[in-house]
Image: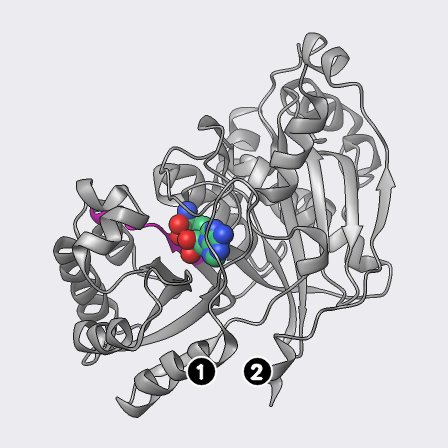
Amino acid sequence: MSEWGLFLIPKYNVVTTSKKVNLTMNITSFTDNKPLIYSLRLEEMKQWLEENGEKAFRAAQIFDWLYVKRVTAFEEMSNLSKALRDKLNEEFRINALTEITHQESADGTIKFLFQLIDGHAIETVIMRHNYGNSVCVTTQVGCRIGCTFCASTLGGLKRNLDAGEIVAQVLQAQRALDADEGRVSHVVVMGIGEPFENFEPLLSFLNIINDNRGLNIGQRHITVSTSGIVPKIYEFAERGGQVNLAISLHAPNTELRTKLMPINRGFPLEKLMEACHHYIAKTGRRISFEYGLFGGQNDQPHHAEELAELIGDMLCHVNLIPVNYVPERDYVRTAKNDIFTFKRILDDRGINVTIRREHGSDIAAACGQLRAQHAKETAG
Ligand code: SAH
């Protein structure tokens, strides 16, 4: 029944708070390039403290100030000596993101547009579920993968985010939820960018948000999504841990996948599936396949049959995503009956499949849309 909810158009209830920032001014005043304190894992914090003649146990205290008490200035860390607070202030930055706008949808989805220290804008989204609040984070400013349906890749890649810039998104989301005592319980790395192209910062980010002296987000509550950077799937499998892996599959054969996702030329479907089989064998963990339904392209019953052939014997789950409309892209929606037919074919083959519930469709919550809009508005 809840599946039908997908097609109800939510009432418009867009609240936009605009703290418009003068971008040009901020870019030219970009002189403060100290590392972000949020980029440090607990172990790295300990090491820094020891190198600076301080006790390692202070690291847990600093984590508590940053991620549990959520202070915004080193000055507030009152159980640290003045000398240590000054030293931290000299060496690290504590303010990572400036809110440009946030929009709240009728379904409770909140979408933030944040400005980074060098003036670039990124998006972060909070989604409300019956099982908790999940935050969707961005890992790169733009993206170079070039998926033909995606808004994030329109302007290409500008730069990678630091680990701390990714951590700070979760922290800002948590601050927003603090108002009504909500908690970030889940994190999905499904915002702008290809996380496996920013691999080391991604691993630090996962480590930092999972740390039980900090935000303490369980690994099983975190999902990383990739467009299919094959070598990194092997590395991710080696790393162990219990973070969920999602693969943006979108097509059941290599010709069609190349048409939708040019990355398939570099990492063809066959190699991608080998990597997925390896990942499952190595970790014993289920993979989640994301399959966008793009009207008339990949959404016919024969595509569903072919998909079932491809993944039918795997430990996996399929998440069907009705296309999010992107003005610059001319993909059209699959009719709801066809979505259910597609799902039924997979169901009948014993494949675990769900249709992704839409969040914040009244506020352009598809990846990269808000940033693209913002770029247009501030251009020139
Ligand atoms: N770069 C990573 C992380 C992005 S996750 C990846 O490709 O997996 C966001 C998911 O939404 C991906 O599965 C992506 O392919 C999908 N997506 C992007 N634009 C979309 C659109 N217009 N409609 C439906 N799904 C889209």
Q: In this view, does 70 lie above or below 180?
A: above
Q: Which mark is in front, 1 or 2?
A: 1
Q: Is residue 300 magenta?
A: no
Segment tinted magenta in the rendering: 224-230
Q: What residue type is labelled 2?
A: Glu
Tell me the residue at 71%/69% (across/down): 9
Helix, strand, or loop for circle 2? helix
- The quarter in which the N terminus is drawn is bottom right
Query: Which numbered marker is on residue 3?
Result: 2
Question: Residue 22 placed where, x, y %?
Answer: 80, 18
- Taking the image as shown, residue 307 lies to the left or right of residue 356, namely left
**Circle 1 residue:** 340
Is the CB of mark 1 within 8 Å of ligand 1? no
Looking at this view, is 92 or 116 the one in front?
Answer: 116
* Left or right of 267 in this view: 329: right
Q: As displayed, is residue 84 above or below residue 272? A: above
How many other residues sit within 10 Å of disc 1, few (<14), some (14-19) or many (≥20)?
A: some
Numbered mark located on residue 22 in the image: none
- Note whether 82 is above or below 167 in the view shown: above
Q: Distance between the residues labelled 1 and 2?
A: 9 Å
Q: From the top left corner, tell me how far across and down residue 91 is, in percent.
A: 63, 20
Q: How is the image coloured?
A: one colour
Above or below, 183 against 90 in this view is below
Number of marks in the image?
2
Q: What residue type is labelled 1?
A: Phe
Ligand 1 within 8 Å of disc 2? The answer is no
Rendered residue at 56%/59% (across/down): 187
- Residue at position x 62%, y 74% in the image: 7
Q: Quadrant of residue 23?
A: top right
